Image (cartoon, rainbow, N blue to C red):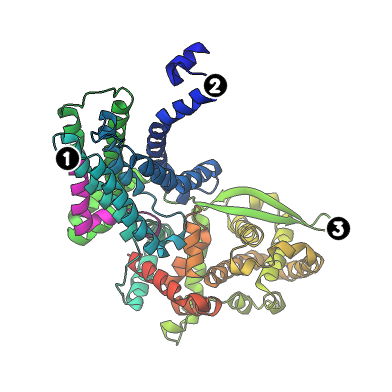
């Protein structure tokens, strides 16, 4: 115990020693914690779009994001009191004057994460006020610690520029895409892609890239370096930080007790330099680099770079690539049991089924009509094509229709021979889609068609009866029953995607992404845009401006 008092708090006793010890170390702990939080957000901030099960990482990102700005502001407040009663500035105060612009630099946040939620993009005025306030506070610290005879003050002034640029980037990173494209031309090019070999894989890979660009545009700074202004500002930042770091080791240190502050200053400078270089590397390794290269260089030069980029990126997935799986067990007479099954990977068979089904529907729908007439329905096309008298199952609330078809699919699946389940085929794919739609209904309450997911137990007897009735009707179709069910689930999946607004789909990107969002963007490419916009306007009349803005983002990200 005596050694602790001597080393940490000095030769004082009790609470008074702890208080003086904290006064001595509080600012040092704060600045090191700020560096740690920014480093964590830089590494893990972008991981939330790649996984849905990383609960601890998501909680830590949420915690560090909320408190990093607050603690940085507290640290700047403490630094504004570095000057004592004397006119001369202490060596410690002079050294800590360099900390203020470094903390302002950290306040700008990492490149991989600028906002936690989509709504924060609308609060640019609040961030602008924060930039003005913290910029003035940092300038005040520089004025207090200014010493014309010491080069430390010049280094602090030089470090102020990266701080203002970094913080200003987080303010100016608002959505500003207004480039309009001919939607019919996009649809034509997209359908040409579907006629090639490996259409399903290529199509969903393109959608995966486009959704990644949307995420980067709305939730991070990635992409800012690929503009003229952004490139110049980044070069200025790196040049200033390198100059300050080199100058700090070259200039003569002020006389005084600097054993604690000197290594902390070095750590802060090295941390700022690593974050800046790391941010540039992340941007160069992103899909934005390929988009920029395609716009400015011939395809012959871009193709090798593209293949190298894909080889590197293939090891790091762009999104979670999984589908939630849930089912209702109707073994209990009182109420059904909701089973949360393991996640299932979105494999190629599911993508091929969706592409094939949409191709059949659009070909049938567009005969003798204009492309603008193509719309998404709830299953009418499938019932009409196969002559199944089950319109009663799709005229109900959409949630009830999902439950009825889920029960029928389960009954048919359980009666299927085990040999047909041993290899991936239409039977397994249909079951996976059925479980995915039930998962959305039960565990995704924010989606508009899931408003009765919590009340399934209230109508389960009726749903079970209707499901058994539907299963008997499907059995009468013989070998066609699985084709009917697979086509029906694809139609329901597309209809569910069209029911959600643009904002709801974009919000899912920060949670690891839903396969439903990929289907939604596929429909926009396919030519079902007018139906989607109509649905969105009917459901969110009070958010028309916001929907239009996000729709512009979608258009801008479509390659």
Q: CA distance from mark 1 to mark 3?
A: 78 Å
Q: Nearer the viewer, mark 1 or mark 2?
A: 2
Number of labels in the image equals 3
| Residue 154 image label | 1
Percent coordinates x, y for residue 152 in the rendering: 19, 35
Magenta segment's dominant SS is helix
Image coords of residue 399 (percent x, y) = 67, 68
Outermost left residue: 149
Q: Report the disc number at residue 333.
A: 3
- Binning the other alpha carbons within 10 Å of mark 1 as few (below 14), some (14 to 19) or many (20 upward) gives some
**Range of magenta residues:** 218-241
Residue at 21 percent of width and 27 percent of height: 254
The residues tagged by marks 1 and 2 sit, at their Cα atoms, a distance apart of: 42 Å
**Disc ID at residue 14:** 2
User: Which quadrant does the C terminus fall into?
Assistant: bottom left
Give SS at disc 3.
Answer: loop
Front one among 36 and 418? 36
**243 drawn magenta:** no
């Amino acid at each position: 115990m005596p050694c602790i008092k001597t080393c940490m708090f000095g030769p004082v006793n009790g609470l008074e020693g702890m208080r003086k010890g904290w006064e001595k170390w509080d600012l040092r702990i704060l600045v090191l914690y700020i560096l740690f939080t920014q480093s964590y957000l830089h590494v893990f901030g972008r991981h939330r779009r790649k996984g849905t099960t990383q609960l601890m990482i998501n909680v830590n990102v949420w915690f560090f994001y909320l408190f990093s700005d607050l603690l940085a502001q507290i640290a700047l407040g403490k630094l504004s009191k570095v000057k004592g009663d004397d006119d001369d500035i202490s060596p410690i105060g002079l050294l800590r004057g360099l900390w203020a612009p470094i903390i302002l630099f950290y306040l700008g946040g990492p490149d991989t994460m600028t906002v936690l939620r989509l709504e924060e993009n609308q609060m640019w005025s609040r961030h602008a006020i924060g930039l003005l306030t913290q910029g003035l506070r940092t300038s005040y610290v520089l004025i207090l610690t200014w010493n014309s005879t010491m080069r430390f003050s010049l280094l602090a002034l030089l470090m102020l520029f990266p701080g203002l640029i970094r913080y200003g980037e987080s303010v100016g990173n608002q959505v500003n895409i207004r480039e309009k494209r001919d939607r019919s031309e996009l649809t034509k090019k997209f359908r040409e892609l579907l006629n090639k070999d490996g259409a399903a894989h290529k199509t969903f890979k393109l959608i995966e890239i486009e959704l990644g660009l949307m995420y980067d545009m709305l939730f991070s700074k990635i992409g800012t370096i690929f503009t003229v202004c952004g490139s110049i500002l980044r070069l200025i930042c790196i040049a200033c930080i390198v100059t300050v770091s080199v100058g700090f080791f070259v200039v003569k240190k002020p006389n005084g007790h600097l054993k604690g502050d000197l290594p902390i200053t070095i750590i802060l400078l090295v941390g700022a330099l690593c974050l800046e270089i790391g941010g540039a590397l992340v941007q160069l390794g992103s899909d934005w680099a390929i988009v920029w290269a395609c716009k400015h260089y011939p395809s012959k030069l871009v193709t090798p770079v593209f293949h190298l980029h894909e080889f590197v990126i293939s090891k790091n997935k762009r999104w979670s690539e999984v589908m939630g799986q849930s089912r209702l067990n109707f073994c209990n007479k009182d109420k059904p049991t909701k089973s949360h099954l393991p996640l299932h990977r979105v494999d190629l068979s599911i993508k091929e089924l969706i592409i094939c089904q949409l191709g059949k529907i659009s070909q049938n729908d567009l005969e003798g009509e204009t492309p603008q007439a193509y719309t998404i329905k709830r299953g009418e096309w499938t019932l009409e094509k196969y002559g199944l008298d089950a319109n009663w199952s799709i005229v109900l609330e959409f949630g009830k229709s999902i439950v009825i078809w889920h029960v029928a699919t389960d009954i048919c699946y359980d009666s299927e021979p085990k040999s047909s389940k041993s290899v991936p085929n239409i039977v397994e794919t249909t079951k996976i889609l059925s479980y995915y739609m039930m998962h959305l209904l039960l565990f995704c309450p924010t989606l508009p068609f899931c408003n009765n997911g919590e009340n399934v137990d209230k109508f389960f007897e009726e749903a079970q009866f209707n499901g058994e009735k539907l299963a008997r009707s499907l059995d009468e179709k013989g070998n066609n029953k699985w084709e009917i069910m697979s086509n029906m689930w694809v139609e329901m999946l597309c209809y569910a995607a069209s029911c959600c607004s643009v904002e709801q789909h974009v919000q899912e990107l920060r949670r690891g992404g839903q396969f439903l969002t990929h289907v939604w963007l596929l429909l926009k490419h396919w030519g079902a845009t007018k139906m989607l916009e109509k649905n969105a306007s009917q459901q969110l009349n009070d958010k028309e401006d916001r929907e239009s803005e996000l729709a512009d983002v979608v258009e801008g990200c479509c390659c």
